[in-house]
Image (tube, rainbow, N blue to C red):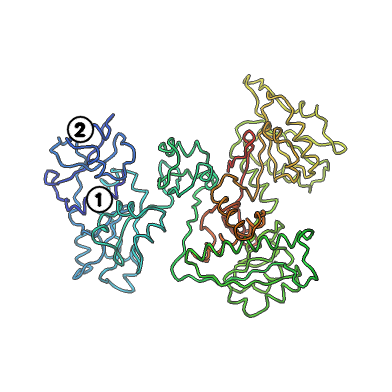
Amino acid sequence: MNKYKIFIFLILMGVFTTFSQQKKYITYKVQQDETIETIAKKLSITPYDLLKLNPDVKNNVSENDIIVIPNKGLSNSDIAESIDLSYLSDKDIIADNYIYHEVQKKETLYSIIKNYKTELSILNKLNPLLLEDGLQYGKVLKIPLQDDDLTKISRISEQGKYTQPYIVKAKETKFGIAKDHGISIDYLEELNPKIKTEGLHIDDVIMVPKGIVSQNQSSYTIHTVQKMETFFSLSNMYGVSKEELIMANPQLKDGVKEGMLLKIPNVIHENEAVFVDKIYDGKNLNIAMMLPFRKKLDSLDFNNDKLLNITTDFYLGSLIAIDSLKKQGLSIHLKVYDTENSAYVSDQLSKKSEFSTYDAVIGPLFLKNVAAVSKNLNFKKAMIISPISTQDHSKISNNNLIQNVSDKEYLANEMISYIRSNYNNQKIIVITDEKNNSDTWSNSILKKLNNIDSIKGISIIKPKGGYIKPELFKTELDSINKETDTITKNWVLLAGTDNVLIADAIHNLGVLPEKYNLTLFALDKPKKINDIDNSFLARVNFHYPTVTFYDEQSDLLKQFEKKYQNKYFTYPSKYAIEGFDTTYDILMRLATDNNLIDQGKSTRLSKRYSYIHSSSGNILNQGIFIIKYDGLELKVVK
C-alpha cells in the first residue's frame, strides 16, 4: 500500500488523535488469506466503499498490507499500530521519512522547532535557503520525522516509494503537472484529494509518481500506457520481453490498455532513467542545419546522386520533427546552410558571427566537415550533432560535439557485454579472420573475451584460403556434455570482418542438425544479411547489435509514414526516418535541459538515445539495440 496516500487521506479527514477509538478511520493490517471482499464483509461495508478508501489497490491485497478502514470497533489485535501525527498541519505531507511543511502566518523558527521536535542546525542543513532568506510565509520546509514516529512509519509499507513530493510553481495547472508526470488528472487528484476542492496554489506541496522506484532491490520505471501502445512498442522502448512485462504487471494478461500504470523492470542499464518528453512554456530554440545540398551543381540528378537523396530525405524528415515540436508549443527558429560537402565551405560558414547564437547545429553529415565546424565552435554554446557518421570522433576536441551513431568498436563491446551478462557455461567458439597479426580486429575481440573470468575456454575456427570446411564446424561443436549428460549449448561468435566469410559461416551453421543447439552472435549487422536465407538465421538464433531498428507494426512509425506520404507524395527512406529521430530527440532534450548527460534513455521511430561522455570528452550516443531472430521474426532482446 502507498503509505503517503494513507497519511494524506487521514490528514485531510482530520482524524489524527492519540487514541484509535476516537478516529473515524484507522489503519488495518491484512491477515493471511484475506481479500478485499472478505475484509469488506467483516466490516459490513461494500468492496466498492473499501476500494474508495484505498485507491492505490488495483487488484487485491496481500498479507501484512496496511489499508485504511472505517473504525468499526475491531479488536486491538486487528488494528495496525496507531501513530500520533496530531502536530501536523493540514498542508503537511509525509514522504521519504520527512515532513514537508508549508510555513504559516505568525509561525516562527522557535514554534516550528518546538512543534516538530527538531533543532535549528538540522533545519538549516535540510533547508539551505533559511540562512540566506530567513523564514518566509508560504515557503516549504523539509523537516525530519520524530524518531518514534519514524520507526512506526517505516513498518507501514514499501509501496510509498512510488510517489514523491512536488512543489507547485507559478502558472502550473493540473493538466500540465499530470502531463509532465505521465498520469491523468483523475489520478493526480486521487494522490492529492485536497486539490479537488481547494485547487492548486503556488508553493503547495503535492504528491506525484516517481520516475524510478526501488522495490525488493530491483529498479522499476513507472510507465503510463499511451494510446495505441502495444506489447511490442513497450518491449522496444524499454528492452524487456512481453513475459517480463506480464510478470511485473499481472493485469497485462488481459492485454495492453490505454491509461494503465505499469511497472517496467529496469534491465537495460543499472539505475538508468527513461527520458520523459517535456516542453516548458516560453522555451525557444535557435537551430542551424548544415547539409551537403550542393546547390551550385549544374543539375540535380535524383536518380543517380545517392548523396543528394540522403541529404534531401534527412532534411524532409527533420522538417516533420520540427513541425511536430512546434505544435507541442516549442518555438524553433531554423536556418539551413549548404556545406557543399566541403571542409573549406563548412569552415567558412561556421566562422560567421551568427553561429555564436545557435543552441544546436545539426550536421554536417561527414567527419571531415564536422571537424571543421567543431574547431570554430569549440567555445560556443551550440551543441554540434554529427547525425550519421560511424567513424571515430575521439580525435576532435569539443565537449559539445555529439556522435549520434555508435562506432563499430562500441557495438562490439555492447555485444560482448551482453554475452558476459548472459553466459552460463555455454561452449564458446569464435570464428576469426585468416590473418594472425596481434593487432587484427579478431585478436582484439579474443582478448576481451579472455578477460571474462566466467568463460572457461574458447575454441577458435580460422578459414584457410578464405574458406572454412563444413566438417570443421562439426568437429568444434558439441552436442552432448559428457560430464553432465545434457545437451551442450554452443555459442558461436563471428569476430571476422570478411562479409563473404560471415555469410558462408551462417549458411554452413544453418544447415546443421538441431542437436548442436546453436546460438550465433555477430559484432555488427552483416552488410549482406538481406542476401542470407532467413530460415538459416532463425535456426542459429542469430543475434546482432544495431543502431537502428524498425518495428514495422509500430503505430508511431505508421503515423510518420502516412504523414510523410501525404506531405511529400513518396515513401520515407531510412534517412528520412533518421532525420526525424535525430532532430526530434535532440530538440526535445534541449527544450528540457542543456545538459544531455544522465537525462535518461529515449526510443524514437528507429533509434535509441542515451548520452554519455566519451573518453575524449565528446558526447556519445550509446543507445543501441541487440536483435535476435526469434523464428522468422526479429525481437529486441536488449
Q: Give the percent coordinates (x, y) of residue 397.
A: 67, 67
- For label 2, the residue is 41
Q: Give the percent coordinates (x, y) of residue 170.
A: 35, 69
- Foreground pick, 563 / 87: 563
**Disc 2 from disc 1: Cα separation:** 24 Å
Which residue is pictured at 62% across the width and 48% down the height? Answer: 549
Query: In the image, is residue 511 above or below residue 527?
Result: above
Amino acid under label 2? Lys
Amino acid under label 1? Phe
Which residue is pictured at 58% across the width and 52% down the height? Answer: 605
Q: Quadrant of residue 576?
A: bottom right
Task: Classify mark 1: residues with Cα within 10 Å, few (<14), some (14-19) or many (20+).
Answer: many
* Residue 90 seen in render: yes
Q: Earlier in the sequence, mark 2 or mark 1?
A: 1
Image mark for residue 7 = 1
* Residue 419 seen in render: no
Which residue is pictured at 71% across the width and 24% down the height? Answer: 513
Is the N terminus in the top left, top right, bottom left or bottom right quadrant?
Answer: top left
